[in-house]
Image (tube, rainbow, N blue to C red):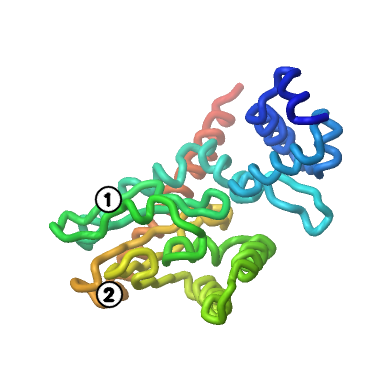
Amino acid sequence: MSEASENRLGFSSVERVLDILLMFAAPGATGNAQSIAEAFGTSRSSTYRYLQVLRSRGLIEEVGSSGDYRISAGFAHMVSATVEGISPTAAAEPVVAQLARTVGETTLFTVRVGDRVQCATYTESPKAIRVGIDPVRETPIHIGSSAKTHFAFLPERERRRILSAIEGAARTKDERRICAELAKQLEGIHASKVARSCGEIEDGVISLSVPVFLPSGALAGVLTIAAPTFRMKSLDGLLSKLQEAAREIELTLAGSRNARAEAVRLINERAP
């Protein structure tokens, strides 16, 4: 069935994408382009496009090399965290504000959406000359300390897929060298749980980033401090404060789940 035929039947592309996402929401559900096209009566080309929309936004992921897809682990963890009582962004907001006041520099918390990274909450430095937030509201997943931290903690298959795409787009010797260096950087970030950047997104700006994890061990987001290089040649002196702040967010996320479990226990104890 062509897309025009689908639309004549009253189904918009948005509705089809949502229908497919809801199909994957069932426990253990998987599907490939052929089975989904048959289930929804869509053309193969339209189905591939719908799947790409969901995959590029980090909502579904490929299962092995079979061509099957399932709900992505990152999306499932994000939904789980929200249902359990508090979202990572809500947990991060007060910590980000306090950290910015403590260190006097712009502080932000980012989340991944597909192959890009978005700023979920931030507090700018109170100083007259400071790092603005606009350049990092949304960035590619391979540029800057915050984005690279997200990149480093992707599932291995997804990390390889994005690296291959970046390498495939490299046209010059320098670009290929940068790609090779990127793979090594990601290994280092994963091992040390710290990422540093200088001038990658904006000239004269340095940044320091650390991961924030959900109780399940999945990445909840990335906490970052950014400052002008003329004021600070290195942010390593602030690393312990950054790590303490990340731990505070993690404890809040863990506490929300524990509090819910405790409430359920007390309710069960009071039941006749």
Above or below for 119 versus 259: below
Image x and y of residue 56, in percent: 61, 49
- Provide residue 104's location: percent of width, then percent of height: 20, 60
Residues at marks 1 and 2, CA–CA distance in whole angstroms: 20 Å
Q: Is residue 183 above or below residue 263?
A: below
Badge 2, how many Cα within 10 Å: few under 14, some, many 20+? few
| Amino acid at circle 2 | Gly
Q: Is residue 238 above or below residue 106?
A: below
The residue that appears at 32% across and 50% down in the rendered structure is 122
Residue toward you, 140 or 85: 140
The quarter in which the C terminus is drawn is top right
Q: Nearer the viewer, residue 134 or 226?
A: 134
The image quadrant of residue 176 is bottom right
- Left/right placement of residue 66 relative to residue 196 reads right
SS for dot 2: helix
43 horizontally vs 203: left or right:
right
Regarding residue 217, the answer to whether it shows in the image is yes
Asked where in the image residue 227 lies, by quadrant, the reply is: bottom left
Q: Nearer the viewer, mark 1 or mark 2?
A: 1
Numbered badge on residue 237: 2
What residue does disc 1 label?
Answer: 123
Task: Look at 25% across and 59% down and name the residue there.
Answer: 131
Residue 92 in percent (x, y) is at: 38, 49
- The amino acid type found where label 1 is placed reads Thr
Front residue of 22 and 8:
8
Q: Residue 101 sits in which quadrant? A: bottom left
Above-or-below relation of 82 to 123? above
Q: Is residue 191 visible?
A: no
Residue at 81% across, 35% down: 43
